[in-house]
Image: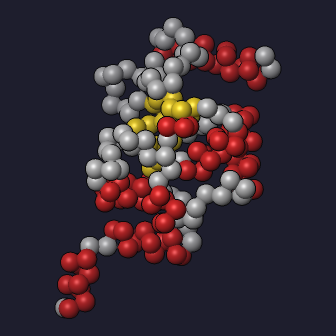
């Protein structure tokens, strides 16, 4: 095991001791991290297989599609290979990505089989409008082009209010 691997194993052991978990390094894909108690207000983080997760088609229509040949995605894949995924993806109950399309593409490039995910209590297929608003909220801090900003505003515009303003 490399020096980084030994450091990670030691950090996980220390984390487990602090959190009262017997072996924090042994995480079963699809199961909540043992360090998160069911009584906690935090959304559990699960390890999900990449093949079970679906990129959101709406993400590509609102924002620019993720290009796996983009130098920034390749650099992110290199970082993930070296340090792992630092921020879990956010997905829906039906496994659509709400936040983390770039991390998803980079994780595939890095050859990962599973990624950490927070699961939002919504199904994309049950309420597409709510899903799209959630997608927008997760992407609020992102650097965007003017076209992306306009598409975001269209999503949140109330047609009745727009019409009322136009006729007043």
Compared to residue 29, the image places residue 135 above or below, namely below
Count numbered badges in the picture: 0
Name the quadrant of the C terminus.
bottom left
Q: Which residue is drawn at 40% across and 38% down?
A: 119
Q: Which picture quadrant has residue 163? A: bottom left
Q: Which residue is drawn at 53% across and 76% down?
A: 146
1 with respect to 137 (left or right): right
Where's residue 57, x and y in %? 47, 58
Q: Which picture quadrant has residue 107? A: top right
Instruction: State the colouring used for the structure image.
Output: secondary structure
Outermost right residue: 2
In this orientation, does residue 106 appear?
yes
Name the quadrant of the N terminus.
top right
Outermost bottom residue: 167
63 with respect to 120 (left or right): right
Q: Residue at x 42, y 55 (%)?
A: 135
Where's residue 159, x and y in %? 25, 77
Compared to residue 145, the image places residue 141 above or below, namely above
Q: Which of these two is toward me, 18 or 44?
A: 44
Q: Residue at x 72, y 58 (%)?
A: 70
Compared to residue 127, the image places residue 144 above or below, namely below
Where's residue 78, x and y in %? 75, 42
Outermost top residue: 22
144 with respect to 57 (left or right): right
In this orientation, does residue 14 appear?
no
Q: Which of these two is toward me, 8 or 155?
A: 155
Q: Which picture quadrant has residue 36? A: top left
Compared to residue 90, the image places residue 73 above or below, namely below
């Amino acid at each position: 095991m490399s020096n980084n691997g030994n450091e990670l194993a030691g950090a996980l052991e220390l984390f487990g001791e602090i959190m009262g978990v017997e072996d924090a390094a042994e995480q079963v894909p699809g199961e909540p991290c043992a360090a998160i108690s069911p009584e906690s207000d935090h959304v559990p983080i699960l390890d999900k297989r990449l093949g079970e997760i679906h990129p959101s088609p709406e993400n590509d229509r609102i924002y620019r599609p993720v290009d796996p040949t983009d130098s920034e995605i390749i650099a992110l894949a290199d970082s993930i290979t070296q340090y792992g995924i630092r921020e879990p993806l956010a997905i829906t109950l039906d496994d659509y990505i709400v936040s983390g399309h770039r991390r998803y593409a980079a994780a595939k490039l890095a050859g990962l089989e599973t990624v950490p995910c927070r699961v939002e209590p919504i199904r994309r297929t049950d309420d597409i409008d709510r899903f799209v608003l959630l997608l927008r909220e997760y992407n609020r801090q992102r650097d965007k082009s003017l076209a992306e900003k306009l598409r975001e505003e269209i999503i949140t515009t109330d047609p009745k209010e727009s019409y009322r303003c136009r006729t007043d």
